[in-house]
Amino acid sequence: MFKINDNFCRLPESYLFSEVARRINAFREAHPEADVIRMGIGDVTLPLCPAAIEAMHKAVDDEGNPATFHGYGPEQGYPFLRDAIALHDYKERGIDIDASEIFVSDGAKSDTGNFGDILSADATVAVTDPVYPVYVDTNVMAGRAGENTSGGWSRIVYLPVCAENDFEPALPTDGTVPDLIYLCYPNNPTGTTLTRSQLKKWVDFALAHGSLILFDSAYETFIREEDVPHSIYEIEGARRCAVEFRSFSKTAGFTGVRCGYTVVPKDLKGVDSEGKEVSLNHLWNRRQCTKFNGASYISQRGAAAIFTPEGRRQVRQAVDYYLENARVLREGLLEAGLQVFGGVNAPYVWIKAPAGMSSWEFFDMLLEKCNVAGTPGSGFGPAGEGYFRLTAFNTLENTIEAVRRIKEARF
C-alpha cells in the first residue's frame, strides 16, 4: 500500500479548539436548558463594517459584467490592495515597506503554517510558551519537532511566558541558537505585549545569530499604548531578520471572508545547502505562484475598503467595542478575586486558575457552574498549564453577564 507522511501521525489526536467544541456540545446535549456563553474561540461577533460590505457588493456586480469580470488574479494580491497596505499600514507609520514585499492571502493562519515550506526541514524552532498551536503543529507536520514528551516536543525550544517573568520571553542563554523564532504580539493567548525595547532585544539577537523571526501581528489594531510597536519593522534592522504576518480577521471581522497578508522584505536572505544566499521574497513568491491562486477579488475589494476614511473609522469603532469587552472582563474578574493578565492592547484575557486546579478542571467547573466556556491554557503549551483564556469577541451584554455569573460562583 502507499505510504503516508508519518509526521501527521505524531500530532495529538484532537486539535485544541476541536476538543473545546466537543466538550461544549456534550454539555449542551446533557443540559439543553443551559444558556452557554462561548468565550473560547477567537471568532468575532460584530458584522462587517458598511464600507467593506458596500465594496464587496460592488465587486459582486463587477463579476456579473463581462467588462469588469475578474477571473484568476495575481497570486501576490491585486495592486489596489497591496498599495493601500503599503501606504496605510507602513508608510504612514514611517516604515519603508514596498508593495512588492506584500503578499495577500486568505489569512495569517494559512501563511504562518505554510511559510515553513521554504525553510529547511532541519531548522531548529523556538516558540513562546504558551503559544498559538498552529506554530507548533505545522512544524510537527514538517518533521521539525522531534518526539512528543510530557514537557512538549523534543526539538522545539520553548520560551516560557508567565506571571513569574512578567510575560516577557527570555533570550536563550544555554547556547541554543534557534533558526526560526515565532513571536506573536499582541500575544495570543496571553493578551500581553512587548515594548519597543523588549522587541529590540529579539531583533538584535536574530541579527547577531542569523535567526529568522516569524512575527505574527494579527492583533496590532488593538494596540492603544504608545510604547507598544504595531509592526516589528519599527525596530531597526528587522527588515534583515523578520517576516511579518497580518490578518483582516480581527482587524475588520473577516474571519469568514478570509483575507490577510505577509510581508517578506527583499533584504531578507537565507542560505542554501551550498552556503549561497537566497532571497526569501523570491522563494515565497515562487511558493505562492505554485501552490496558491490568490485571495478572491471580492474579499480583496472588501479589505481595500477598510483603508478608506469611512472604513478606518468604522473598523476603529468595532475594535473599541471589543476592547471595552476586554476591560469589562479584566476588571470584573479582578473584582471576583482572580489573577488576570492581558486585555489592555489585545482582545484576550489570561486568567490564573484558582489554586490547585488544572486548566481543564477550571474549564469544566466554569462550564458547569457558570455556563461560560473558555479555552484551557494547557492546550497552548506546557507553560499554559494552570491558566485559562477568555476572549472579548462577544456582545457587551454577554460579557457583562459572564462576569456576573463568575462573580456569583465565588472562585
Image (cartoon, grey):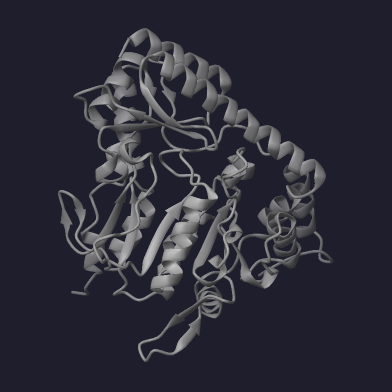
Q: Please tell me how many numbered marks the rendered image carries.
A: 0
Q: 11 or 379, which is in the foreground?
A: 379
Residue 253 to residue 325: above or below: below
Q: Quadrant of the N terminus?
A: bottom left
Farthest right residue? Answer: 67
Residue 312 lies in quadrant: top right
Identity of the residue drawn at 25% across and 66% down: 175
Return the x and y of residue 205 as percentages of the image width and height.
41, 65
In the visual, does 376 lie left or right of 286?
left
Return the x and y of residue 403 as percentages of the image width and height.
45, 16
Residue 339 to residue 278: above or below: above
Identity of the residue drawn at 29% across and 31% down: 23
Residue 9 lies in quadrant: bottom left
> Could one spot residue 40 in this view of the protein?
yes
In the visual, does 188 lie left or right of 409?
right
Q: Quadrant of the C terminus?
A: top left
Residue 2 lies in quadrant: bottom left
Residue 271 to residue 197: above or below: below
Identity of the residue drawn at 31% across and 68% down: 177
Farthest top residue? Answer: 408
Identity of the residue drawn at 42% across and 19% down: 333
In the visual, does 168 lie left or right of 347?
left
Return the x and y of residue 294 as percentages of the image width and height.
60, 66
In the visual, does 92 lie left or right of 102?
right
> Could one spot residue 114 in this view of the protein?
no
Return the x and y of residue 82 as percentages of the image width and height.
70, 64
